């Protein structure tokens, strides 16, 4: 990238009613890569996850993750999984912070998606996740949805979508 | 929090933000995805726990044979 730029395309802050999914639609096809930064907190007392989907479809995803919990490390596969949520029983006003990178989102090749995230918690139990998803679909990505796997995200959870240009 | 799960959509071209209740189909799909994710996560966790348990058992057997902790570490790492 000779002169890469990072441009905020859109953002969303969850209101008082909470939200179970956030979708960025009509994504401009003028950038090289996409970057999502999100900060979420779940509304239930267990660490559920956030799932990503493209163009309204959750099919065609395969995934691997590596997760540290503060006391152990596990790896596995959960299609579409990109982060673990801070639960309502964990330290008040803390959130999961996540970055999701989607290179070459307009290409006609399959799309790779990588993410890194941490749950904030003033306790030993705190998750750190590295994930890699592959979306086996050749369509350009025009919309992205991030969905809570079983719960809602609380007020002030935030989602930012950036476009990265290679020149 | 709203009783019915909410979906938020941000149109990147217009900037219009739409908030609506999830449809019954969307709620059902979310439940299926949640169960699938939970099942996959539980299976991965169980596999990881078994590996850790097997590792601990193997180290205990090596120790019972008379190997020191340093010797066990040398051949298992």
Image (tube, helix red, strand yellow):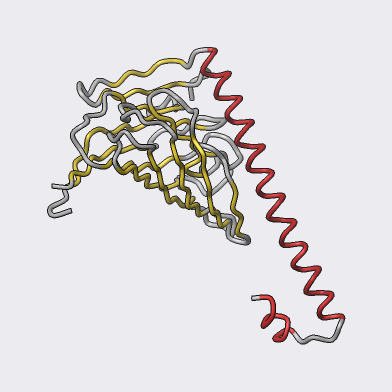
Q: Nearer the viewer, residue B24 or B46?
A: B46
Q: Position of residue A128 (x, y in %)?
A: 50, 54
Q: Quadrant of residue A162?
A: top left
Q: Residue at x 20, y 38 (%)?
A: A31
Residue B72 image position (x, y, % from top left): 73, 81
Residue that protrudes farthest toward the top in the picture: B24
Q: Is residue A131 above or below residue A146?
A: below
Left/right placement of residue A65 relative to residue A114 reads: right
Q: Is residue B53 above or below residue A115?
A: below
Quarter of the image for residue A33 reads: top left
Residue placed most toward the observer, A158 or B35: B35
- Residue shown at the point (18%, 44%) measured from the top left: A165
The residue shown at (18%, 34%) is A30
Rendered position, A60 above or below B66 = above
Which residue: 44% across, 34% down?
A: A136
The residue at the far right in this view is B64
A14 horizontally vs A27: left or right: right
Count the marks.
0
Residue B7 in percent (x, y) is at 42, 22
Residue B37 spot, x, y in % from top left: 60, 36
Q: Where A53 falls versus A46 (above or below)? A: above
């Amino acid at each position: 990238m000779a002169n890469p730029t990072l441009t905020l395309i859109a953002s969303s802050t969850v209101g008082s009613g909470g939200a179970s999914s956030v979708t960025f639609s009509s994504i401009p096809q003028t950038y090289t890569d996409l970057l999502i930064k999100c900060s979420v907190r779940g509304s239930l007392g267990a660490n559920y996850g956030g799932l990503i989907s493209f163009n309204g479809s959750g099919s065609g995803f395969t995934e691997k993750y590596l997760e540290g919990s503060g006391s152990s490390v596990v790896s596995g596969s959960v299609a579409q999984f990109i982060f673990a949520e801070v639960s309502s029983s964990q330290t008040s006003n803390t959130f999961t912070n996540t970055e999701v990178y989607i290179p070459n989102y307009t290409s006609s090749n399959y799309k790779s998606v990588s993410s890194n995230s941490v749950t904030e918690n003033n306790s030993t139990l705190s998750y750190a996740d590295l994930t890699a998803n592959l979306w086996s679909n050749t369509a350009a990505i025009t919309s992205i949805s991030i969905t809570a796997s079983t719960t809602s995200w609380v007020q002030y959870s935030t989602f930012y979508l950036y476009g990265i240009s290679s020149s | 929090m709203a009783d019915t799960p909410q979906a938020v959509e941000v149109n990147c071209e217009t900037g219009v933000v739409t908030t609506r209740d999830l449809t019954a189909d969307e709620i059902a799909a979310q439940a299926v995805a949640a169960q699938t994710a939970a099942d996959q996560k539980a299976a991965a966790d169980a596999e990881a726990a078994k590996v850790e348990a097997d590792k601990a058992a193997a180290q205990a057997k090596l120790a019972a044979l008379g190997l020191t902790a340093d010797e066990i570490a040398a051949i298992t790492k």
